[in-house]
Image (tube, rainbow, N blue to C red):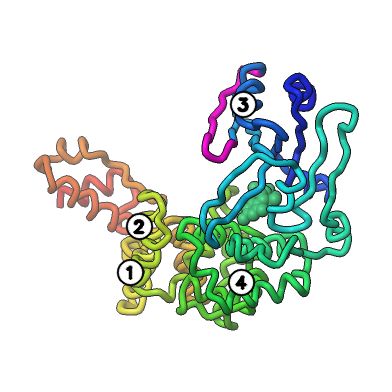
Amino acid sequence: NIGAAAEEMHYKAYVVGGFVRDLLMEKDNYDIDIVIEGDGAKFAVNYAKKHNAKVFVHKKFKTAVVSFDDGFKIDFATARTEYYVTPAAAPEVVESSVKSDLFRRDFTINAMAVRLDGAQFGLLLDFFMGQKDILDKKIRVLHSLSFVDDPSRAYRAIRFAVRFGFEIGSHTDRLIKHAESLDLFSRIIGQRQFLELKYILAEDGYLFALQLMNKYNMLRFYSTKIKYDDELINKFKRSEHLLNWYKIQFEEDIEVWRMRFNILFFPEKGENFISLIDKFELSSKEASILKDDHKYMEYAVSLFKRYKDHKPSFIYGVCSNLSVESALALAAVMGESKQDIIKDYLTEYKNVKIDLSGQDLIEAGIPKGPEIKKALDVLLKAKLDGIVNTKEDELLFIKN
Ligand code: CTP
């Protein structure tokens, strides 16, 4: 029905990019990008009105997002030619045809469109041999300046290569090496740098992606402390076993990219890690999750090294601030010896609760205020170490 709406406005409408790629590869994709030859934002406003949907317009880029009540979203854009005034800068936008819109895109496999309006509904536009590259399993840029226009595409090339099991074409491979030698990747803004890494770490083939990033000497733009060697590979392999174990135990998904991020950046110490995260310019919430994960992992490693007596209450004290993602990362970086301890923490100690409430303690004669918290902590410790088991034990313990 986008086609019909376009006809009414005498516009041409196309679905483009990843959706078309995945359609041809018979893979699911629910991200729909529409390009309009005409005013895409105006089209989106009309379309949203007709379908009782919400619309958010980005005037400067002549784009809009239409969101439906069930959460489904469609992105609309005006066919455009972009002029990059300086490399890696935000592009200037002018109205144009779908062909030049496709030409400004990253890879041939992402630069195809399907017509949605009129008699030509369903027509595939493939000006740059995207279909051939899908068959040949190749990631290829459309022109030699692609990485100069947008250096973050090199990380995308790696991501698509590992996702689909494709090879990076030889010319594209040379262009990535050239971009690296010109230090172009250092111009990618922090947030984009972070996102590209996050997406890579969310891929099943992330380890191969890291190997490619290493080959292209691209890991250094994140941290010079990251060494892609057998030690790191072993840590990641351990983390995959731990992840499988966790999923079976708890039947719940975690943010796998976060676990992998924690492993990858663990060699960065304290202050250095903090300034590295600050460079990504993330929301304060995201930044503090990452910083906390790292801080509590470092804390745990140093305590496990310093003290040899690993009573349950000690393990609890060391691990209680860890998120699941950082606990699994910790188990992976500490090696086999600590894995069982952290598994015990996640399956048992983490969920230990005492039966007495604060009110019970007041009734038992503990004065209100900080004493209560202290008593609860002591009780929890005793319960973790098996000194008390029942509510009655707890009462007796506290009275003594
Ligand atoms: N694109 C581009 N250069 C970029 C980012 C995106 O040319 N640096 C284009 C590509 O044509 C891509 C489209 O914008 O297909 C949409 O981008 P995005 O949603 O990031 O990628 P998808 O290809 O949809 O990939 P994914 O399946 O990971 O969502």
Q: Nearer the viewer, residue 18 or 185?
A: 185
Is 297 above or below relative to 27?
A: below
Label 4 Cα neighbours within 10 Å, binned few <14 / some 14-19 / many ≥20:
many
Residue at 28% from the left image edge and 44% from the top image edge:
392
Q: Which mark is residue 210?
A: 4
Badge 3: how crowded within 10 Å, few (<14), some, or many (20+)?
many
Q: Which residue is mark 1?
A: 299
Type of amino acid under label 1 = Tyr
Q: As displayed, is residue 126 above or below residue 172?
A: above
Residue located 49% across and 69% down the image: 186
Q: Which residues are magenta?
A: 51-62
Q: Nearer the viewer, mark 4 or mark 3?
A: 3
* Quarter of the figure that contains the N terminus: top right
Q: Total number of numbered labels?
A: 4
Disc on the earlier residue, 1 or 2: 1
Residue 363 seen from this side: yes
What is the distance, in whole Å, between disc 4 and disc 3 at their CAs? 42 Å
**Outermost bottom residue:** 230
Could you say which disc has been placed on residue 321 in the image?
2
Magenta residue check for 310: no
Q: Disc 3 marks which residue? A: 42
Q: Amino acid at mark 3?
A: Lys
Which of labels 4 and 1 is toward the front? 4
- CB-based contact (under 8 Å), mark 1 and mark 2: yes
For mark 1, give the secondary structure: helix
Pinpoint residue 77: horizontal percent, then vertical percent: 64, 37
